[in-house]
Image (cartoon, rainbow, N blue to C red):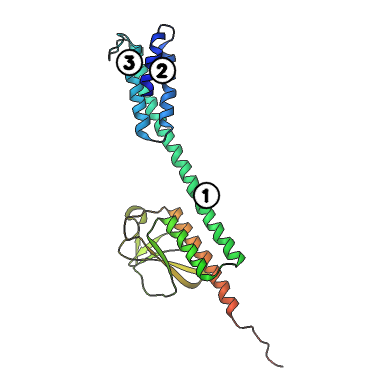
Amino acid sequence: MAPLVACAALSPLRDNFANTNIALVLVLLIVAGAATGIRAAGLVAALSSAAWFDFFFTEPYNHFSIIDRADIETAVLLMLVGGAVTEIALWGRRQQARASSEQGYLDGVLSTSAAVGAGRSSTDSLLDHVCEQIVGVLGIDRCRFDPGSDAILATLNNDGTMTYNGRPFDVGRLGLPTDSEIALVVQSGGVVHGRFLLTAATRIVRPTLEQLRVAIALANQVGAALATSDLDRRPPRTEPNR
């Protein structure tokens, strides 16, 4: 409605302003609509601007028809600019959302590293904390730690790739497997301390390679913590009598 209100308000002054100046005012309204991040809002604002520009500011006035070629070009440009500005605004919002997600992933890894380094958290609370973070990062249903080593159909490898039944599995195209738990090995220094079993059964989830690597980094942090815990539990070494 904003283009309609603006055009109706400015129409009594159309003899004092060039149509190009009116078009610039309408471009501002289009930008405002596109800034909402809703594609439909930007496109509707562009179409509305072109229509009411035609109705109020092109001869014959108060009719949806254009005679002058320059006015036709202006109306077409309003729609093209509206479409372009809308897509640029959406791209900017996607980049902002991506940057926010990356910051969230980094914060999760850093908080886990801090907990591991401080050694204040018990093993169970650390495992629960990392499971919650993995669920949030990957958007899956559930995560649990398993100290066992039974065979699992799907395995998330340390480089972010996945194998399913011994074959490469394209997560970007197919999404995470929904018919099997996914094993994410917890290791440190080449020693396996268990694994996280991930469940994504209720819907198709397609995490990015970056998200998968964050989950792997979190698992490796747990591996470092468990390795340190194992060292602490070893009995002290005694020197043989000479």
Seen in the picture, residue 213 relative to 2 is either above or below; the reply is below
Q: Are marks 2 and 3 in contact (CB under 8 Å)?
A: no
The residue lying toward the viewer, choosing from 120 and 232, is: 120
Residue 7 quadrant: top left
* Relative side of 239 to 162, left or right: right
Query: At which x and y percent is residue 90?
Result: 41, 36
- Residue furthest top in the image: 15
Q: What residue did someone put label 2 on?
A: 23
Q: From where the camera sits, is residue 189 visible?
A: no
Q: Give the image location of residue 121, x and y in percent.
A: 56, 67
State the mark number for residue 54. 3
Disc 1 marks which residue?
103
Find the distance from the CA under tag 3 to the CA under tag 1. Answer: 47 Å
Disc with the residue nearer the chain's start (3 vs 1)? 3
Query: Which type of secondary structure does the marked residue at label 1 adopt?
Result: helix
Residue furthest bottom as drawn: 242
- Asked whether the residues under the numbered discs 3 and 1 touch, taking CB atoms below 8 Å apart as contact, a structural biologist would say no
* Left or right of 168 in this view: 232: right
Q: How far is mark 2 from mark 3, CA to CA?
A: 11 Å
